[in-house]
Each structure stands twice: as structure tokens, then as C-alpha cells.
Image (tube, rainbow, N blue to C red):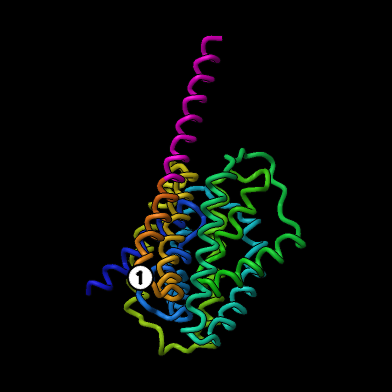
Amino acid sequence: MKKLIVFAFIGLLSQLIDGSLGMAYGVTSTSLLLAFSITPAVASASVHLAEVVTTAASGVSHIKFGNVDKQTVYQLVIPGSIGAFLGAAFLSHLPGDVAKPFISLFLLLLGGYVLIRFLFHYKPALEKKYVPLSRKQSIPLGVIAGFADATGGGGWGPVTTPILLSRKGLSPRKVVGTVDTSEFAIAVSATAGFFISLGWEDVNWLWVCSLMAGGIIAAPIAAWLVQKFHPQLMGVLVGGFIILVNARTLINEWIENTAVYPLIYTAIGAIWLFAVLFVLSKIGNRDIAKTAVDVYLKEK
């Protein structure tokens, strides 16, 4: 019973992060499931099955709050679905013990990418006239992001969200809503790929239902929060959390000297804390500058 409550909390936390940030449901939840010694294929299958429901709830919530660019959703779902199906079939044929450290390494790298992206390269976007993705852009983006999502248990958001944020025209809230809504199709395709290759018997339905329950509760809250919470701080918090969880798996697998474990965890925690404080100072400085400009303009 305790484990089901923990899984429900994992689903709630992951969906809250994903719905607010446009990424990290799969990466966060898969990382935590791997920490419970669940094999990568079963962890990813469980997460994607839960995502069929949670992404549907998230998509409806984002559409309700006006956070979705439907044209971009249509451009991404077909290539993304193909990539997710292929990725699920590929992961299902890898031995669990062999795949686990490499999947954790992939997730750790994704976490590092998220952290660096929001720490040093975050730029608030302005809503201008949006130029839609071309086929040459949407097809490879969808296939690569879908494949990464299925093999790593997460990757759709970390790949597509930064790329869409780098384009002029879509505000951050619409990028997040568009990515979360299109992820429904990716979750369905990945789940189909896992069940064809892996079968139904290895999936623990109580775990999946717990993940679903937490995600359903968080979906409308996250769709509202995306308009309120500062995305740069959320990105740094998520990136550091993903790094810490997957570093634990890699340390246990590859380092036999347990005496160095506290030193490594302390170093990761110190870097994460510095990143959070750095972002808070940047946010504070921007707010001070904005206030000063507003006062100056009023005086004029």
C-alpha cells in the first residue's frame, strides 16, 4: 500500500512538473521507478501506459486554458508516433540488467541538458506572428523525439520544448501546452509498441493506476500554473532532480567504493543549490529592472 501511495505521488509530481514546464513527466517518473529496481522496459511501458490517460487530461486542460497551437500539434503527432513505436520495440528487446545503467545515463544527460538550458540559455519569448514548422523540420524532430521518449522513458518534452521555444512566435505557455497535448499520440504509440514486443504480463496495473491517479489530479493544476510559475526556476529544479536520481543508479552500478558516495552526492547537491540560488538572483534582478523601467515610464 505504501508503494502505491509513493507511485501516486510520483505521478502527481511528474505531471505537475511536465504540465508546467512542457517536459520531464517521463524522465522524472522513469528515473524514480528505476530507483525501485524496476527494469527499464517495464518502467518505460508503465510510464507510457499511465501517460495515455495523464496526457489526455493534460491536453484537455491546456486546450481549456488556451495554451495550445493546434497546427503544430498536427505536424508533430504522426512522425512522433512512428519514432515512439520504433523506440519501444527496440528497448523491449534489450536485457534489463544491461540496459538499466545506459538508460540512466541517457536520462542523466537529459537532466543535464534541461539544467543547462534553463540556467544559461533561458530567454523569455514574445508572442509574435508564428511561422509553422516545415515538413523538413517537423518530421525529423518528431521521429527523434518520439524514439528518445520511448527508449529513455522520457524525451519528448526535453527535445521538442527547447526547439519550439527557440522559434519566434510561440509564447512559453503555448509551447508547453502544444508539447503536452501532442504527447498523447506518442504515449499511445509507445504503449502499443511495448505491448506488441513485451506483452501485458510484465506490467503491474496497480502501479500504473497509481501513476495515472496522481497525474490526473495534477493535470489541471499544472495547466493553470504554467501561466503563473516562473519556468526558469522550475527548469533548474527539474534538471537537478533528474541528475541526482539517475546519478544514484549509475553510482551503485559502476562504483564499488561506497566511501565516496557521500562526497559525490554532496558535490551534486552543492552544484544544484548554487544553480537554484543563481537563477533566483537572476529572476530578482530582472524584476527589479522591470520595476525601475515601469517607474521611469510613469514619471515620463
**Residue nearest the viewer, comparing 188 with 31:** 31
Q: In this view, does 190 lie to the left or right of 268?
A: right
- Residue at 42% of width from left, 47% of height from top? 224
- Residue at 50% of width from left, 64% of height from top? 108
Q: What stretch is highlighted in magenta?
A: 274-300
Residue under numbered circle 1:
258
**Residue nearest the viewer, comparing 284 with 204:** 284
The answer to whether 250 is drawn above or below residue 274 in the figure is: below
Q: Where is residue 188 in the image (x, y as percent from the top left)?
A: 53, 74
The secondary element bearing badge 1 is classed as helix
Residue 211 occupies which quadrant of the picture? bottom left
Total numbered badges shown on the rendered structure = 1
The N terminus is located in which quarter? Answer: bottom left
Residue 31 occupies which quadrant of the picture? bottom left
Q: Position of residue 115 (x, y in %)?
A: 51, 52
Q: Where is residue 208 in the image (x, y as percent from the top left)?
A: 37, 75
**Residue nearest the viewer, comparing 240 with 209:** 240
Q: In this view, does 280 lie to the left or right of 122?
A: left
Q: What residue type is labelled 1?
A: Thr
- Residue at 53% of width from left, 75% of height from top? 102
**Alpha-carbon neighbours of circle 1 within 10 Å: few (<14), some, or many (≥20)?**
few
- Residue at 51% of width from left, 87% of height from top? 95
The answer to whether 207 is drawn above or below residue 110 in the figure is: below
Q: Position of residue 111 (x, y in %)?
A: 50, 59
From the image, give the main secondary structure of the stretch colored magenta: helix
Can residue 223 be found in the magenta stretch?
Answer: no
Can residue 275 be found in the magenta stretch?
Answer: yes
